[in-house]
Amino acid sequence: MTKTSLQFSFYTILFLLLFSQANSQLINEQEQAILLNLKKHWKNPQPLSQWTSSNSSHCTWPNITCNTDGSVTGISLQNMNITGTVPPFICDLKNLTTLDLSFNYMTSNGFPTALYNCSKLQYLDLSQNYFAGTVPNDIHQMARLRQLNIGANSFSGNIPPSIGRLTELRILQLFLIQFNGSFPPEIGNLSNLEVLELGAMTNITTTLPSEFTKLRKLKYLWVASSNLVGKIPDSIGEMAALEHLDLSMNNLSGNIPSGLFMLKNLSIVYLYKNKLSGEIPRVVEALNIDVLDLSENSLTGSIPDDFGRLTKLSGLSLYSNQLSGKIPDSIGRLPGLINFKLFNNKFSGTLSQDFGRYSMLELFQVASNYGLIGELPKHLGDNGRLLRVAAFDNNLNGELPKSLGNCNNLTFLDVHNNRFFGNVPSGLWTLLHLGILILSHNSFTGELPERLPRNLSRLEMSHNRFSGEISAGVSSAKNLVFLDASNNLLNGVIPQELTALPHLTTLLLDRNRLSGSLPSNILSWKSLNVLNLSRNAISGQIPEKFGSLPVLTVLDVSENQLFGEIPPELGLLTLNSLNLSSNHLTGRIPSAFENGAYANSFLNNTRLCANSPSLNIAKCDSKPQNSSKTLSKLVPWILGFVIPAALLGLVASFLVIRIYRKRKHGLDLTWELTSFQMLNFRESDILPGLTDNNVIGSGGSGKVYRVAINSSLKIVAVKKIWNNKRQEEKLEKEFLAEVKTLGSIRHFNIVNLLCCISSTHNSKLLVYEYLENRSLDLWLHGKSTTRASTGSGSVQHVVLDWPKRLQIAVGAARGLSYMHHDCSPPIVHRDVKSSNILLDYEFNAKIADFGLAKMLMKEGESATMSAFAGSFGYIAPEYAHTTRVSEKSDVYSFGVILLELATGRKACDGDENTSLAEWAWRRFQEGGPLVDALDEEVKELRYLDEMCCVFQLGIICTGILPSTRPSMKEVLKILLRWNQPPVFGEQNTAGE
Ligand SMILES: *[C@@H]1O[C@H](CO)[C@@H](O)[C@H](O)[C@H]1NC(C)=O
Ligand SMILES: *[C@@H]1O[C@H](CO)[C@@H](O)[C@H](O)[C@H]1NC(C)=O
């Protein structure tokens, strides 16, 4: 090489170096400007506040990654409260390879095709936003994509087939989108794909294209709840890399292809809730299976013997099929087995005695097979890990294994309807967590223990041979709700301690040998609905206190030795069923019961008489007897209340029957559960709880039930929306609005929607968290509401003190303020009222019932109301004149709640037909002492200042002109001045 040429190349390199340095500095400045523009385009969201043009390089900004040249390669803005669109200039970042905008509030009309210009983009995550419109068929222009996630958005239309041309894709996630049509077979061309998520597409109806089985590198396939029909492709056995297969909750039919269990790497298989039939294939290669759930199908035949080779198996769910034969003993020896659920099949033969011996078994559920015989496995509880054992409805015998008494975590044991005998292992009676114990319909013997497990809520032991006395120690089970010990050999008296169970709703002790008299000090039976003591040898009189049991609806003390007169106070009960027959009662029947509804209530008491012939007993002498004085006092009451109540009772029992019939018809309805979080229950846990006994309220569109979920001892509130053909469309809309809004909100002061369940016949169930203290209106105005009839849920009239009221006001204000100011787009509730403010066990307020809430389309712009909403007394005056509502209408309604809290009056309770808001305004204008308007029941000197201020704040919030009302944020600020945030304060408000 010559010198000059050397020199030349030296200068060239120097020049190029300098040039490229200058160039890269220029690029860096440009890129910083682009990022700042982005921030501005998104209206400077708070989480991006550190993106500022100080002298520090943008490569040090949070959520930005650069290459070594200082050029931006990645933007990761997950969950940053970003609103707005994806601007085209984002692709001016020439080296952008990663873009994550998931979990924001971004919108679009169609897939943001501007991103096609990001020529290096490899990872794109737009999931969990509000992107809408279609995904165009030229999406393959993003040829370099290795990951595409657009799940949980509002896209519509079809899945574009050209997605199958993005052959670099490793990960494709299209879940929870309302696409129409079917799955394009072209997806099967994505030969590099490892993860494919197409679940929860509720609008699609499709087969699983057999082309998908060409995806030989696919490890993870999730297509749950996407209306899959047809068969599982036979060639599925060729997807050699498959580890996780979830096709659950679809309508797949036909056999499970035998190739499936040839897949060596398979570890999770979820095929539950389909219509699969035929036999379970033999396990050939798939020895790595960890969880296998084939439950709720129509599988037949027996469990293949080689299941005993699945040494990694921890969960086996085959329940609700038609499986039969003996359960292979080898399964009992699997070392990893934790959850074993085989109930509701036709299995027969004995159970391996090894269950529980070699593994840390937690669930053992073999109930309702009817054909299982022999003993429960002796070692079942050896490891002490058991949580739940269900073996009911079989033909099992022997004694319960002693090892069960070591299982300190055991919450549930149900062995009813078998042939067990002997004593219950004494260890069982001391298990701290045992909540439900069901032993009925066996031949158990022995006495009841000195004490019951502290957390026991349900004890069923009827139809056995238990004997001895009921010990005073029963009162140790303070949470007992249901006690059924009927048809045993119990004797002695009913201990006074049995009445010290404030949550007890049902007490059945009939058909025993109890003697002594009825307990008379029964005032803590506040929740008792049903009392059956019939067919014993109880003597003495019926105590008049029985008339003051607040929620008693069934009373049966027939076939005892009771004597004396029937206390007229019994007429105060609102009974559905009364049976006092076959005793030695005397005298005149209280006139409350002179009614055909009680025709069979008094039979076989030879010395009883009635005035009316409608009861099948002797007529009294016309001369009134000595009890007439009390009677005459009661007459107006009886006429005004008791008779209508009795009629109501009749009507109610009629309804129960009708509903029961309906349910029987409805059993083959299919229900679909859409959850918004991890749930430990299924719809089958909810549906049986929708009975009249569980109704706790009814709203504009349907009833609300309180349902205890046996499997988790959890209680939920279920709102059922009626299937009313005429209103269907309107209700459907209401329902969708509620689900969509609530499902997306997580806030401490907003009721948590757990899931929604819809049936093929348009019935809808919304499942919420259950709040122990129900709603604010019951506490403020509960005196005049109808009596609550559901056990522990009943509300006595206890006055809410002022600090609690203030705490409730603050909580509700937080919830509303969050919806108005922190949700994007903002959410207007439209039906704020005290019955929609629910209270948890610590009286934290949670706002409920977003049935009428609707997203405001654009910030600041009021949406048009499609229907008249709200409830009298809470409705802002602008509703009358205009169809436009805004957040300020909620502020008005909230002001009414503040007035309720301060005055104790109802929203509609001014005088002369005015509302509370008008009444308060007039009091205020008249200028008298405000103190006189405050609630007498909570007024205390130390609270007067606060109460007056809340009263005035209520007046300001209920100003006639929306513009004069403060925002919820301002209201919250004012309230917080007095309310030192207690434990539930700031740190929790972002939700749980
Ligand atoms: C964004 O940056 C913040 C601050 O460094 C960090 O806490 C957060 O995890 C980052 N988010 C993402 C999605 O990378
Ligand atoms: C988004 O907004 C909510 C509600 O204001 C807030 O709690 C949360 O911290 C915000 N997220 C970020 C990342 O700032």
Image (tube, helix red, strand yellow):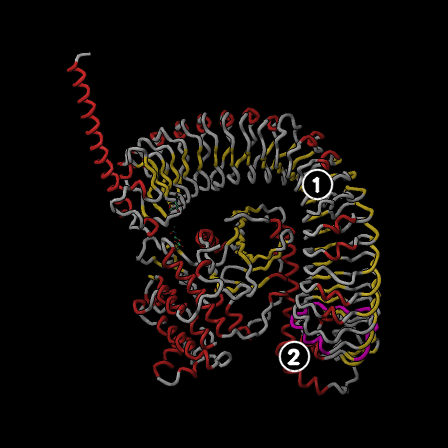
Image quadrant assignment for residue 908:
bottom left
**Is 33 on the left or on the right of 882, as rendered?**
left
Position in image of residue 274 (x %, y %) = 59, 38
| 558 or 935: nearer the viewer | 935
Q: Amino acid at mark 2?
A: Ile
Position in image of residue 130 (x %, y %) = 38, 46
Identify the residue at image location x=70%, y=67%: 554
State the SS at label 2: helix
Above or below for 902 versus 305: below
In the image, is residue 173 part of the stretch drawn in magenta? no
The residue at which mark 2 appears reads as 638
In the image, is residue 546 part of the stretch drawn in magenta? yes
- Can residue 604 be seen in this snapshot? no
Give the residue furthest to the left: 4
Identify the residue at image location x=52%, y=52%: 754
Above or below for 182 versus 798: above
Give the residue furthest to the front: 3
How many badges with numbers are in the image?
A: 2
State the SS at label 1: loop
Tell me the tag on residue 298.
none
**Is 74 on the left or on the right of 596, as rendered?**
left
Q: Amino acid at mark 1?
A: Asn
| 34 or 774: nearer the viewer | 34
The reply to whether callout 2 and callout 1 are in contact (CB within 8 Å) is no
Q: Which residues are magenta?
A: 544-564
Position in image of residue 18 (x %, y %) = 19, 29
| 378 or 534: nearer the viewer | 378
The residue at which mark 1 appears reads as 345
Position in image of residue 271 (x %, y %) = 59, 36
Identify the residue at image location x=40%, y=76%: 951
- Can residue 436 be seen in this snapshot? yes
| 257 or 759: nearer the viewer | 257
